[in-house]
Image: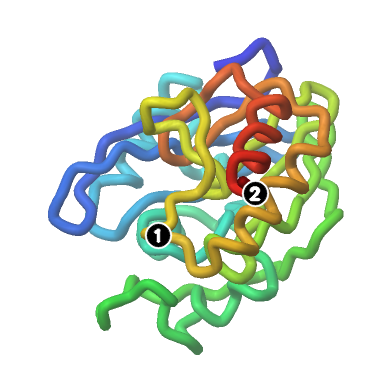
Amino acid sequence: MTNDPGLHALPSTVEFGGRELTITPAVVETERGLVLFDVGPADSGAVNALETHLRSLEYDLADIWLVVLTHHDGDHAGALATLLDRTDAVVAAHREEVPYITGDRAPIKSSGDRYPPVTVDIALSDGVRIPTLAGPMDVLETPGHTPGHISLYFPESALLVAGDALVADREAPLSGPKPRFTADMDRALESVAELGTLEIDHTLCYHGGYVERGAERIREIAAAARE
């Protein structure tokens, strides 16, 4: 994916909402093992796909010690209960996302059905820093897509793991959040503008994967939204 040691994109195609969906979870290596960003939909084969990727990297599911959810949507968090049946991983999410993941609130975009709830062990907030073999990883609050959406930023390599704050599956190499799936579009675009102030050279999106575009393109997206 990049020249950065220890960071790996794990793309797969899964079933979600009656259609095929390409998703891009990722892992970063740490002294304790692997940190996983997002999992995939429930009952989709997402965990098996993760296992296959990890074996190619000479790891196993059991090497995941921490799962960081960018937000609570079912295509990101739905398979988490299945993963936890096979690992002892700790789960972390932004404090605003916790009640949706634990089942105390229905997912914002749910039509009534929901994925199995799980316990969240760590409530994250802006500025939390986690050491990794790819350098320090900073938690960034990027709300809008959901109330507590987060992105992950690796300042040493100028890499952004965007979650759904940005997408790369349109004709443009990097685009803003999709209005259809965004709870608060105005706030989401404010988050995009804030990301544009950072030194970002390349971006990993959950939808669309890795692109060699960063802050310049992000600023263009924010400026276009203001027109």
Give me the residue at 48% from left, 86% from top: 105
Q: Is residue 110 above or below residue 133?
A: below
Query: Label 1 is placed on what type of residue?
Result: Phe
Query: Left or right of 162: which side holds 74?
Result: left
Q: Is residue 106 above or below residue 118?
A: below
Q: Name the foreground residue: 67 vs 59.
A: 67
Say which element carries label 2.
Answer: helix
Q: Quadrant of residue 153?
A: top right
Residue 144 seen in the figure: yes
Local packing at callout 1 (Cα closer than 10 Å; few below 14, some 14-19, many 20+) is few
Query: Left or right of 56: which side holds 12?
Result: left
The residue that disc 1 covers is 181
Residue located farthest toward the left when viewing the structure as drawn: 18
Residue located farthest toward the top when viewing the structure as drawn: 3
Q: Is residue 200 above or below residue 146?
A: above
Give me the residue at 53% from left, 61% from top: 145
Query: Label 2 is placed on what type of residue?
Result: Arg
Front tag of 1 and 2: 2
The residue that disc 2 covers is 226
Say which element carries label 1.
Answer: helix
Q: Position of residue 10 (x, y in %)?
A: 44, 30
N-terminal of the pair, mark 1 or mark 2, is: 1
Q: Position of residue 88 (x, y in %)?
A: 55, 57
Q: Name the foreground residue: 80 vs 197.
A: 197
Q: Quadrant of residue 223?
A: top right
Query: Left or right of 122: which side holds 119?
Result: left
Local packing at callout 2 (Cα closer than 10 Å; few below 14, some 14-19, many 20+) is few
Q: Position of residue 102 (x, y in %)?
A: 51, 79
Q: Which mark is residue 153?
A: none
